[in-house]
Image (tube, rainbow, N blue to C red):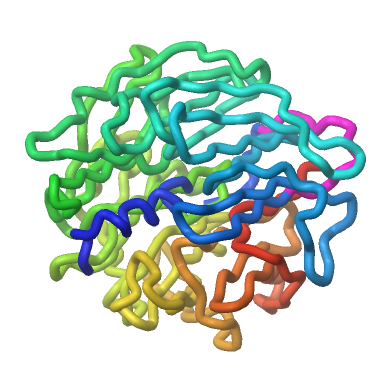
Amino acid sequence: MNTTFKSIIGLSLLVLLFTACKKNNDPEPNDQSVNYALSVTGGTYPNQTTYIFGTKAFPAGTVNTGNAVELSSSGQMFKYGSEIYVSSFGAPATLRKYSFDETGKPTQSGSIAVPGLNTFGAVEFLSATEAYAASNGFGGIPQMVRFNPSTMEILGYIDLSTLQLPGASEIYYLGLVERDDYLFMGVNYQNASFENLEDAVFVAVINKSTSTVEKLLKDTRTNMMWNGGTTSSFSPACLVKDAAGDIYVNGYANNGKPSGILKISKGTTEFDASYFFDLDAVTGGHCLGIFYFDDDHVFTVKYSDESAYPFDGSAAGELYKINLSATSTSGNIAASLPKFFGSYTFMTKWDNEKIYFNIAAPGSNAIYSYKISDGAVTKEFDLTGQCNGFTKIK
């Protein structure tokens, strides 16, 4: 994999944001006419537009963006409760909060902005009054923002400057998981040539009580992570927490090391030396991201063409179902699905019937569903651009 070109670093910012499943501690939804929210991005980097809009009925046919709010950049949608939040690229880093009128048009109801930053790389909501947002690289200020998602007030900052490593010209903060009063955050280090600083996975352990970085974990069994999904985002995740409280960390394939999954066991703040899920060996190809819903429904993107990995030089993605405890796979969930651009994939669910996921393929963009009871895959509707968010908000 060649990471020496600055252009692909720009493209990767589109996906440094991050399994999309419903949080159990969501607040009660507001009384709204709109039931579903979507985000679609059109154009080619860097000339892109993001469209945010809502619908009353479950979408069908080809969904257009006629009643959307337009953002003149790439954007990433997050969802908490009945509210939608959008982070767009460009200084100052801004996270906007939206509600919807009865026509489905979004109305901005608040925002936070931090000068000196370009975009927020990961956003995680812990409650109606506490959330965290971390910035992406490109010389940004090394800090995490703590804010109130109800009032959109900034409550404080966590200094991340101690995460700097010698020789790192860019640092990307990728994904957030909370457990035991700690935040676990993936970190990607790039040198001046836009190459991985080291062939290893790094995870920062942040003490919420003291708002300080406690340690930086490192493991060399797999390589740097790239995606940064959280439980409130719509993109592949590299950190997920399972029902037992164990944290799983996805590293990418590069420089002879396989894509794989590491574990930080419940009650610890170290990598479990006895656990390693070699995704390359088990699936037969390089893999990207973890989509976790429960122990029986875990997925990853496997690439059929390793030359396309992980920056999607061509459409080579396939959705594979995996088992974290058994370190095994049951294979492709549907061989009939078109090959897709894996970095743009998300999966989301809001009931016990279906898991919804997007397929960004050459010449088409669509939302599909995976039936939980029997694994049947069905195409639900088409979109006019790449979908980077679809959820039920009521």
* Magenta region includes residue 146: no
- Give residue 257's quadrant in the image: bottom left
Can you see residue 236? yes
Q: Is residue 122 above or below residue 190?
A: above
Query: Which residue shows up at 72% across the image and 76% down it?
Result: 379
Write down the region rendered in magenta. Answer: 26-37
Query: Which residue shows up at 45% across the image and 75% down it?
Result: 317
Question: Nearest the camera: 324 or 64?
Answer: 64
Q: Is residue 135 left or right of residue 58?
A: left
* Magenta region includes residue 32: yes
Quarter of the image with the C terminus in it? top right
Quarter of the image with the N terminus in it? bottom left
Q: Farthest residue toward the left?
A: 166
Question: Nearest the camera: 33 or 296?
Answer: 33
Residue 299 lies, in percent from the top left, at: 49, 65
Residue 182 lies, in percent from the top left, at: 38, 27
Question: Nearest the camera: 170 or 352?
Answer: 170
Q: Is residue 268 left or right of residue 328?
A: left
Residue 128 lies, in percent from the top left, at: 65, 23
Q: Is residue 305 above or below residue 187?
A: below
Q: Is residue 311 left or right of residue 107?
A: left
Query: Which residue shows up at 14% across the image and 66% down it?
Result: 255
Query: Which residue shows up at 39% across the image and 56% down it?
Result: 11
Q: Farthest residue toward the bottom?
A: 336
For the image, the number of numbered tags is 0
Q: Is residue 39 above or below residue 97?
A: below
Residue 256 lies, in percent from the top left, at: 14, 70
- Give residue 23's quadrant in the image: top right
Q: Main secondary structure of the magenta part?
A: loop
- Give residue 231's quadrant in the image: top right
Can you see residue 177? no
